[in-house]
Structure formats: C-alpha cells, structure tokens
Image (tube, rainbow, N blue to C red):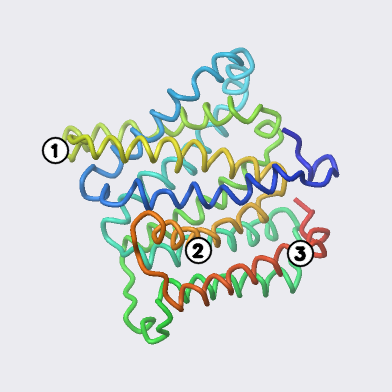
Amino acid sequence: MTDSNATGAAPRTLDWVLFLLAPVFFSSNLIFGRGITGDIAPFTTAFIRWAGSALVIFPFVYAERARCLAFVRANTVIWLVLGILGMGICGGFVYWALTMTTASNATLIYTTSSLFIILLQWMFQGRRIGAGELVGMLIAFAGVTVIVLKGEPQALLHLRFNLGDFGILAAAIAFALYSLLLRHPAVKAMPPMPLFGLLSLSGALVLLPPALYEVLTGGLLPDTQGDWVKLAGIIAFASLAAFYCFQHAVRVFGPAMAGVTLYLMPPMSIVMAVLFLGERFETYHAVGIVLVMGGLVLATAPGRKAAASTG
C-alpha cells in the first residue's frame, strides 16, 4: 500500500473508506466486549485477543518469513516497544483500568490521544499546528463531551477521577506514541499484513507474563460459549480489522490525521448501540454527532494538510 504523504499522491477512495471503517471496528467493542470486563481477567483477555490475532495473521507472516525475521533482528527494540504500547498498555492495561473507572470517564480521557499525537509531533518533529485544526479538534472534543455527559453540563460536577482514570490517560499517551512510531522508516517499509502479524505476536509476548500471573493467582478465565464468542468478535473486528485500518490511515494520512478517528468512536458507538442493542437515540446524541463531525471537517480541511504535512 502506498503512503500518500510520502509519495505526494492524493488519497484514494479506498483510503478514505478504511479511514472511516477504523472507528467502526474499534467501536465494535461495544457489541462484543460488553460484559467481558469482570468475566475474564484483564491481562488474560488481552493476551487471548492478541495471541488469537497473531494466529490468524500467521500465514501472512510465514509467506514473508525472511523479511519478518530480518525486521525483528534489526529492530527488536522497536518491535517490542510497539507491542508494549499498542497491545500491552492499550490492551490489558486498559481492561484493568476499566475495572476501576466508568466508561464515561474512559471515553473522555482516551479521546485526548489525538491531541497528544499533535503535541508530541510539535515537540519532537517540528510539526506546525494550524489555528483551524486546533479549533476543529476542540469542537470535536466538545461533541464527545456532550455525548458522554448526556447533554447535562452539571454532570461535570459529579465526575470523579481515580487510579483507573490515570491508567486510561497513560493508555492515551501510549497510543499516541504507538501512532508516531508506526511512521518509523523500518516499520513503514514492512508490508501491512506481515507487520500487523508481528505486532500481534509482540503484544502477545509482552502480555504473557501478567496473564500467567493472573491464571496462577486465580484470575477469571473464559468458561462459557458467550465468553468465547465475545473474544472471537474482539479478535476479528476490534483487533484485526480495527488496527489494520488504523495502521493504513497512519501510513496514508499521517499520525495526526489518523488520530482524529478516535473522535468518531463515540458517534459510531451510538449508532451501533441503536442498531444492535436497541438503545434510544436522544437529542444530545444528535448535538454531539453534529459537533464531532463539524469539528473533524474543520480540523481535516484540505487547507490544513499543508501545515500538518511536517512529520
């Protein structure tokens, strides 16, 4: 797959389709992941998720085994760090944090990852931040806030933060670092599917020790058909499909542009909840979606891309 930022080519229709599918697949956690927290130990869940993903992708890795081995040998630290950031901290650590915080807090905090991407690029890569881009992202974040608070500003007074919230904040920063590291020349040179298989394997390896600790200390294991169905959905959609689409977006549009897909997750989650879980569509949902989409249009307008192209 080509990197339009690197080649100067305009993004194709398929690139935009995959860009928009990333938050859809990430949001599939709402369907497949509901109820799994508390039924299966957090790091065990994450280990099964990424070990399963690695097994599914293994044929692609095997087909490019010489290239994959060369990549791992030459870039062992990068390979393991990507596994720690993208699958360890943003996987098991998030599941653990969700046992102590609310979904509302987690949604608000995790969407700040896109802001951290831009901040880190500005600090370390000399990225320029356009005023329109910044205003657009703030509007989108306001839309997320409206959705999370259910259109009731006074609900801000009742938000409480604890260790789990700081865990989600750590994951947001980790995801930003993961997104930037995907732009490393050695990583970009790898074909997408073998690369994803290697990252899934890296994630499984770094998650194995804490998962074993949970098992040895009586952690909850999947023991029903429903547990395995949810895990299969998480592997197929929230892992394989979501991360593939996101990594493609990073290659084509760059980390900052790809990061704005996080703002689309709450609206996508609402639509999926209405379609698959029978939840009601409220007025505040509409207001939040309009703000999110309007902010994203402003933040990603063609005039902003020139300013954002650095890095």
Looking at the rendering, which quadrant does residue 72 occupy?
A: top right
Q: How many numbered marks are there?
A: 3
Secondary structure beneath disc 3? loop
Q: Are the two marked residues, 1 and 3, in contact with CB atoms closer than 8 angstroms?
A: no
Q: What residue is at 67 percent from the left and 75 percent from the top? A: 135
Above or below 283: residue 221: above
Q: Counting residues from the N terminus, which is met first, the one under dot 1 or under dot 3?
A: 1
Q: What residue is at 44 percent from the left and 47 percent from the top? A: 90
Q: How far separated are the C-alphas under marks 2 and 3?
A: 20 Å
Residue at numbered disc 2 = 267
Residue density around tag 3, few if under 14, some if 14–19, many if 20 or more, within 10 Å: few
Q: How far separated are the C-alphas under marks 1 and 3?
A: 52 Å
Looking at the rendering, which quadrant does residue 149 occupy?
A: bottom left
What is the three-letter code of the residue carrying label 2? Pro
What is the three-letter code of the residue carrying label 1? Gly
Q: Position of residue 232 (x, y in %)?
A: 35, 35
Above or below 267: residue 309: above
Left or right: 32 in relation to 7: left
Secondary structure beneath disc 1? loop
Q: Foreground: 163 or 105?
A: 105
Q: How far separated are the C-alphas under marks 1 and 2?
A: 37 Å
Secondary structure beneath disc 2? helix
Q: What residue is at 23 percent from the left and 42 percent from the top? A: 40
Quadrant for the N terminus in the image: top right
Q: Counting residues from the N terminus, which is met first, the one under dot 2 or under dot 3?
A: 2
Question: Which label number is shown at residue 218?
Answer: 1
Left or right: 305 in relation to 93: right
What is the three-letter code of the residue carrying label 3? Ala
Which mark is nearer the camera, 2 or 3? 2
Q: Position of residue 293 (x, y in %)?
A: 61, 67
Q: What residue is at 55 percent from the left and 27 percent from the top? A: 76
Question: Which label number is shown at residue 301?
Answer: 3
